[in-house]
Image (tube, helix red, strand yellow):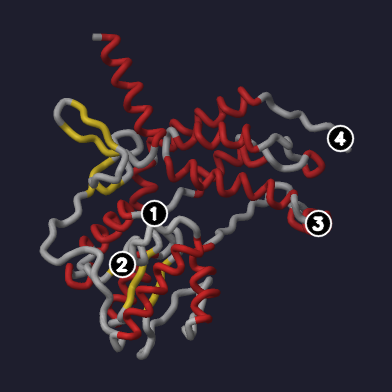
Amino acid sequence: MASIDRPEVSELVARAREIAGVARERSRAAEAARRVGDDMIARMRQADLFRIMQPQAYGGFEYGFDVMVQVEATIASGCGSTGWVYGLLASQQWLIGCLSKQAQDEIWSDRSALSAGTYTPIAQAVARIGVEIGLDIVEVHDGAPEPAAGDLGLLVATHGRDELALLRRALESGVPYVGLVASRPRGTGVRAELRSDGVSDELLDRIDVPAGIDIGARTPGEVAVSILARLVAARRAGGGAHEPSHRPGSAAPLVAIDPICGMSVAAVAGTLSLEHEGETIYFCCDGCLHQFEARLEQASGRA
């Protein structure tokens, strides 16, 4: 086997820093398109950043997670979405390396091949436990579910993929329970986007997010139980609507722009923020917050 010319970690981080600069400039476009552009994926590929955890036997650099995380954090400092996508694709190279040699040979017959996957433990737990209480739960992994008459509810747990279309379809079909597995700030942002697309507040108020009753759940199984409690309540009420998680008449959620990456974020108490010159500045992640603080320090040093 020919030896691999493996770059130093500092060189890989430098390449990531250059990509972060481009990602920062294109963050607004990525936010508007709701996806990271193919050109950014191509830049990361050209910089060999996807080879970091690929085995040397297949042309990779065979570094560990520590190096991959350094690179991911550097890219995310420019655009959180781009960093997240990089981390998903790069970590899959390690996962492929855990498969059988036959599988690795097949996948890496093209050594530049990339793969991605998602894991939805909460949805799987809902399906597993739901059977025990007599619910006929249908999991849809590809394509869009079509709510039908008699359906009790629709739970969206897609980590951002097609969320808006799925929620709108469920709300407009009259499904009694509509739940979204997401954080409260994310839910606020989703409602704001649906409102801007013309969905009424009356319908938006029916979205249960974070999905489930508040029982202090932490594990996927506990969250599943809290969601199933909502479904049981709807079933026992004869298919009536669940208790709304956003009260009618309350103030419409506000959306702010992260000054570093340009991403839209919910301007609520749970969102990362800091006070500056009498104004609350909101951020999508720790990286953007720390970068803003660093800029303030630099500016004060020049003053």
- Asked if disc 2 and disc 4 are in contact, CB closer than 8 Å, the reply is no
Q: Dot 3, crowdedness within 10 Å: few (<14), some or many (≥20)?
A: few
Q: Is residue 17 shown left or right of residue 4?
A: left
Which quarter of the figure is the N terminus placed in? top right
Residue at the image point whose x is 26% and y is 13% from the top: 300
Residue 212 is labelled as none
Residue kind at label 4, given as amino acid type: Ala
Residue at the image point whose x is 23% and y is 9% from the top: 303
Say which label, 4 or 3, has the lower sequence index. 4
Q: Nearer the viewer, residue 1 or 181?
A: 181
Residue 34 is labelled as 1
* In the rendered image, the vertical position of residue 209 relative to residue 55, given as above or below: below
Residue at the image point whose x is 31% and y is 39% from the top: 272
Residue at the image point whose x is 44% and y is 78% from the top: 145
- Labels 3, 1: front one: 3
Residue at the disc numbered 3 = 100
Residue at the disc numbered 2 = 208
Q: Nearer the viewer, residue 265 or 4?
A: 265
Measure the alpha-carbon separation of dots 4 and 3.
Answer: 22 Å
